[in-house]
Amino acid sequence: MIRFILVALFVFIFLICSIPILIVEYFIGKVNMDVKNRSSLAIVNWAFRVCLFISGVKVTVIGEENVPKDEAVLYVGNHRSYFDILITYVRVPRPTGYVAKKEMLRYPLLRDWMRYLHCLFLDRSDLKQGMKTIMEGIEKVKSGISICIFPEGTRNKINDTFLPFHDGSFKIADKAGCAIVPMTLNNTAGVFEDHLPKIKKAHVVLEYGKPIYMNEMTREEKKGVSSKVQEIIKETYFKNKELV
């Protein structure tokens, strides 16, 4: 429980102490949005690294050379833990927004930082609003902001299984013409979710697959892209189980 208390305390202190930083970042954005994007990325990146350090998380990263550094991409990953966000966010080479459930909007300060980081808030019960979120994601990518999405739609609570990938998640890559970068995460639930409410030391493996460009696919291949990406992540997941 000590790690949980320390992480919760750090997050609380960070959010409170960051109020003046949020104000400064707001005015920086009025002058130079690119500077704001990168400074916000650096600040939250540091906070996440502190949380991972306190939690005792060791991460082995494979295939990081597969992530394009000079263009926005769509990251697609399996989802078992809240720590998926922390572990993947500290690796991004450029400003990146995550697709989050709309319920996150109820948390003040946290939601402000998420907005600064170009996160999108998805209403999973409203198809029309869901499509609007996808369109926002397309515009983000076109403006140079990468997007990360977990197409299972929620955290999967059963080890070694995968929920169906929602096809709509991939429209961002199709319409924006960006690369899809598969992300495979092993043992992230071992940090927290497998033994709530305790946070325990854990070894996590994160592997990036080779980028996939939908504009190089036929119409039929595009229809099966969600299954293709899920299969890549599945194969990588079971390959990396022995590394945990």
Image (tube, rainbow, N blue to C red):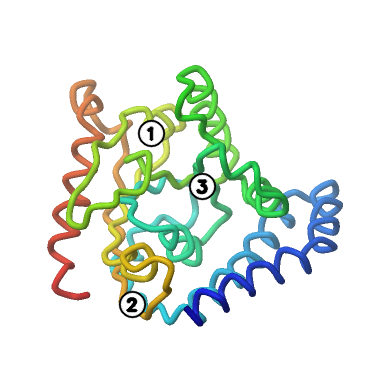
Q: Quick check: 25 above or below 52?
A: above
Q: Can residue 68 be seen in this snapshot?
A: yes
- Image quadrant where residue 22 sits: bottom right
Judged by depth in the image, the label closer to the viewer, 2 or 3, is 2
Vertical order, 63 against 225 (above or below)? below
Q: Which residue is mark 2?
A: 202
Residue 229 location (% of width, % of height): 24, 43
Q: Nearer the viewer, residue 90 or 157?
A: 157
Q: CA distance from mark 1 to mark 3?
A: 12 Å
Find residue 164 and report its horizontal and vertical position in percent.
24, 36
Disc 1 element: helix
- Inspect the image, locate mark 3, and give the three-letter code of the amino acid beneath it: Tyr
Query: Could you tell me how far apart the alpha carbons at marks 2 and 3 are, in whole angstroms?
Result: 24 Å
Mark sitting on residue 2: none
Q: Secondary structure at mark 2?
A: strand
Residue 101, image x and y in percent?
A: 51, 40
Please name the residue that numbered disc 1 is placed on: 169
Specify whether 149 is left or right of 11: left
Check disc 1 and give the amino acid type: Ser
Image: 150 above or below 226: below
Q: Residues within 10 Å of mark 2 (few under 14, many from 20)?
A: some
Q: Are marks 1 and 2 in contact (CB under 8 Å)?
A: no
Q: Which residue is mark 3?
A: 98
Which numbered mark, 1 or 2, is in the foreground of this view? 2
Judge the density around disc 3: few (<14), some (14-19), many (≥20) Cα neighbours within 10 Å.
Answer: many
Of the image marks 1 and 2, the number of the one nearer the N terminus = 1
Upstream in sequence: badge 1 or badge 3: 3
Q: CA distance from mark 1 to mark 2?
A: 30 Å
Q: Residue at x 50, y 66 (%)?
A: 90
Which kind of residue does numbered mark 2 sit on? Ala
Q: Quadrant of residue 20?
A: bottom right
Residue 141, percent from left and from top: 53, 39
